[in-house]
Image: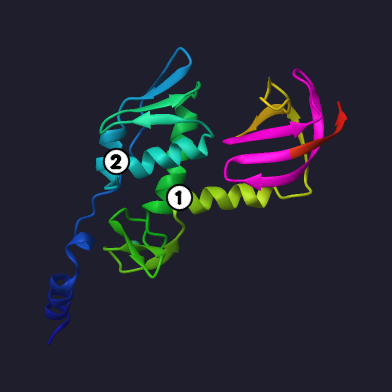
Amino acid sequence: MNYDALLDKAIKELPDVLKEHSRFEKPSVESIIQGKTTFVKNLGEVAKAINRKTDLIAKYLIKELGTAGTHDAQHLTLKGQFREPQIQEKFDAFLEEFVLCSECARPDTKILREERINFLVCEACGARRSIGSIKASVQKDVKKELAIGDEITVEITKIGRKGDGLAKIGNYLVFVTGARIGQKVKARITGIQNTMIFAVTIEVI
Ligand SMILES: [Zn+2]
């Protein structure tokens, strides 16, 4: 076979996706702040563009922005005020971790679950890598940051029913023994349970 024939043969055997040179355009999140909430107008569209479920993206954004929220097939409503670039930054991080192939950078990937591990498998080049579940990756981050015995500085914004001072760290509710409302205190963590942190006051700042 001569060179041209070989080249022809090689091109014919390439997967279709490599023949198209369509560049992947990163979807842009569109959002507006309305009072004390932020409204993402095009959740459904961006989900479709990257071939992921709205549920997965919504969960990720809510957790990474450290807030609460609700969503339907098209929109996401976040508690609190978030600027569009802030949401875009988190969305881009989602793309990096859960969509784009780290070998060829294309978005033609799917998530496969095998033996309780999630893999991102690239349909363009065949590469695969393991990815965390969203829940696990968020918990891991908090665990990495906070552990029993750590000192934290928090501002007490409420008082709980049993008289503990209450504060927030991200998604976490902190119960601080020996602190009063309005105080900023240094406290030591004595326990972490789901989304609750228990701490005792070391000193009022
Ligand atoms: Zn790839």
**Residue found at the very far front of the displayed protein:** 162
Q: Amino acid at mark 2?
A: Ala
Answer few, some or many: residues within 10 Å of disc 1's Cα (few below 14, many 20 plus, some between 14 and 19).
some
According to the picture, the residue beneath numbered tag 2 turns out to be 47
| Image region (quadrant) for ligand 1 | bottom left
Mark number for residue 23? none
The residue lying toward the viewer, choosing from 126 and 160, is: 160
Which quarter of the image is occupied by the C terminus? top right
Could you tell whether 171 is left or right of 69 in the image? Answer: right
* Amino acid of disc 1: Ile
Query: Residue shown at 65%/52% (left/top)?
Result: 144
Q: Is residue 179 magenta?
A: yes
Any atom of ligand 1 within 8 Å of the CB at mark 1? no
Give me the residue at 27% from left, 35% from top: 44
Q: Is residue 52 above or below residue 173?
A: below
Mark 2 lies on a secondary structure that is helix
Mark 1 highlights which residue? Answer: 134
Q: Which mark lies nearer to you, 2 or 1?
A: 1
Mark with earlier residue (2, 1): 2
* Prevailing SS of the magenta stretch: strand
The residue closer to the viewer here, 119 or 175, is 175
Q: Residue 172 placed where, x, y %?
A: 60, 37
Instruction: Give the image location of residue 143, x and y in percent.
Output: 64, 51
Q: Which residues are magenta?
A: 171-198
Query: Residue 46 location, x and y as percent?
Result: 30, 37
Distance in Å between CA atoms under marks 2 and 1: 16 Å
